[in-house]
Image (cartoon, helix red, strand yellow):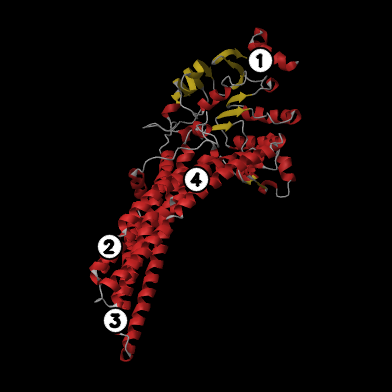
Amino acid sequence: MARNKFDIDETLETPFDIRHLKRALVYAGKYRKTIFLSLFISILAAGVSLLSPLIVQYAVDNCMKPDTIPLLAVCAAGLLLCIVTSVFLSRTRAKMMTRVGQDIIYDIRRDLFRHMQELPFEYYDSRPHGKILVRVINYVNSVSDLMTNGIINFVLEMMNLLFIVVFMFFVCWQLALVVLCGLPVYAAVILFIKNHQRKAWQATSNKSSNLSAYLHESIVGVQISQVFTREKVNAEINDKLAKSYRKAWMKAVGYSNLVWPSTDIVSTLTRAAIYLVGLLYMPGLSLGTILAMGDYSARFWQPMMNLSNLMNTFINAVAYLERIFEMLDEPVTVKDKVGAKEMPEIRGDVHFRDVTFSYEDGTNVLEHLNFDVKAGQSIALVGPTGAGKTTIVSLISRFYDLTGGSVLIDDTDISDVTLRSLRSQMGIMLQDSFIFSGTIMDNLKYGRLDATDKEAVEACRIVGIHDYIVSLKDGYDTVVSERGAGLSQGQKQLIALARTILSDPKILVLDEATSSIDAKTERNLQNGLNHLMKGRTSFIIAHRLSTVRSCDKIMYVSNKGITEAGTHDELIAKRGDYYRLYTAQAV
């Protein structure tokens, strides 16, 4: 069962957890040399920038006479040099950290995708795929700015504040205290705003996730929506989700937009206090000193505002990091055990020993299942929908781990071998004939990249799709889009079947491999399949019983096990479950 739907918010309102930030810094560790160099350049740029008010102070106090014009020109040149140097150093630092940040984001995305490839089927069965995409794309993008400039900017702004305070006390300690008197007021205002701002942005993230999940679901199911004329209803659902996102975003932006006016008001009031105190209560101060302190006061509040914004970024990013690392920590339940060995070349014997399996605790799909299949035999699995036919072939491929018992191939327990060595010797065609974006030839070679074009063409001849492919303008180089748009269900199924054949499997699994193929094509295909299955152990799931009459053994799956097994003629003679199913289809 899905953990949540597109209209159910994910819980993101969690306390700030510094552990997630520390874990993210592990990714930054490999780039520490560049980060430290960037930090040094940033500190140098800040120091050069803070020389400007001192130059202005000196020029105002000492270069306002006609005979000091040359000295004033030197001061102007020095001021220009400070500005140019500061801009150059800041630009250099920005380029360095942008590259580092994007490298870190690349590393996180790479690890996420590699982990996603190993997660079991049940992970994707229990979640809206749109919300998985949000974590990999949106959430990673959201922490991009933090990893790019956030950490180093935090250190830089702290250094800036320290430098500014030192310079202010160096110029006039009395007016420096006037500036610092605004801190308690500013802190109270910002703490009030930040508490509401964080919750508002988390709510915005939830609404964005919901909208993305529904959009993904709508794209995948657009044909069904049109079949049932759901366009108007779906549009209303989308409008509702979009309005919820807009409302949450406007609320969050409203709180965010209170930060800079609050900072600006406090900054203006403290600068006014400097001029008031300096001119009225400290008549001995020079005009240059008062102007320099006014400049430093303005510079003091800018990093304060930046730090406030950075703190909000940190808090929100940690919430996103929690979701990212939650996905990275999702256990790979089906994986190679410690000391797993390579699967020897498969002959094809398959043994189920007291197998019990459940998708959910307490609800067994199979119980104490036992059967033996000899190498080269063709086995048909039939029975009612939901009885466990697909589950049995999934267990042979070890897509799931058993609840109890064991599955052996050639007397080797498949849990003791590597998944790659096991599955590379199996050809599995599932019910969903998924076609990837790319050429038809790319799709045919998807499971066997070293296959030749001649081998791919031969596989298509066997299944009867060759003539159709060569009739296309670009033949095997014809580009198909994701999910095979432009191809019929039957054509997609035949291409998927040819892809399975091309992998040259030792054990062949066909799960409703001909369900979308017309009867005439199926008859033509059957000869090719009979040739393919010769000498291979084959498991065939089919609801159309006419397609499995010639199998060596037919097993009727029901009541959490196999209730009947034998050839077609033997089962007909028993007049049991298989007989009733077969005669029902014959009517």
Instruction: Please report whichever mark, 1 or 4, sits nearer to the chain's N-terminal start.
Output: 4
Q: Which is more foreground, mark 3 or mark 4?
A: 3
Q: Which is more foreground, mark 1 or mark 4?
A: 4
Q: Which is more foreground, mark 1 or mark 3?
A: 3
Q: Mark 2 touching mark 1, by CB under 8 A?
A: no
Q: Is residue 222 left or right of residue 98?
A: right
Q: Secondary structure at mark 3?
A: helix
Residue 458 in view here: no
Label 1 environment density (alpha carbons within 10 Å; few <14, some 14–19, many ≥20) = many
Instruction: Please report whichever mark, 2 or 4, sits nearer to the chain's N-terminal start.
Output: 2
Residue 568, disc: 1
Q: Secondary structure at mark 2?
A: helix
Residue drawn at x 63%, y 41% as measured from the top left: 219
Q: CA distance from mark 2 to mark 3?
A: 26 Å
In the image shown, does 504 or 12 lie closer to the viewer?
A: 12
Instruction: Please report whichever mark, 1 or 3, sits nearer to the chain's N-terminal start.
Output: 3
Residue 113 in view here: yes
Q: CA distance from mark 2 to mark 1?
A: 87 Å
Q: Mark 2 touching mark 4, by CB under 8 A?
A: no
Q: Which amino acid type is shown beneath numbered disc 2? A: Leu
Label 2 environment density (alpha carbons within 10 Å; few <14, some 14–19, many ≥20) = few
Residue 550 picture location, percent across and down: 67, 20
Q: Is residue 437 left or right of residue 82?
A: right
Q: Which amino acid type is shown beneath numbered disc 3? A: Asp
Task: Name the residue carrying label 2.
Answer: 162
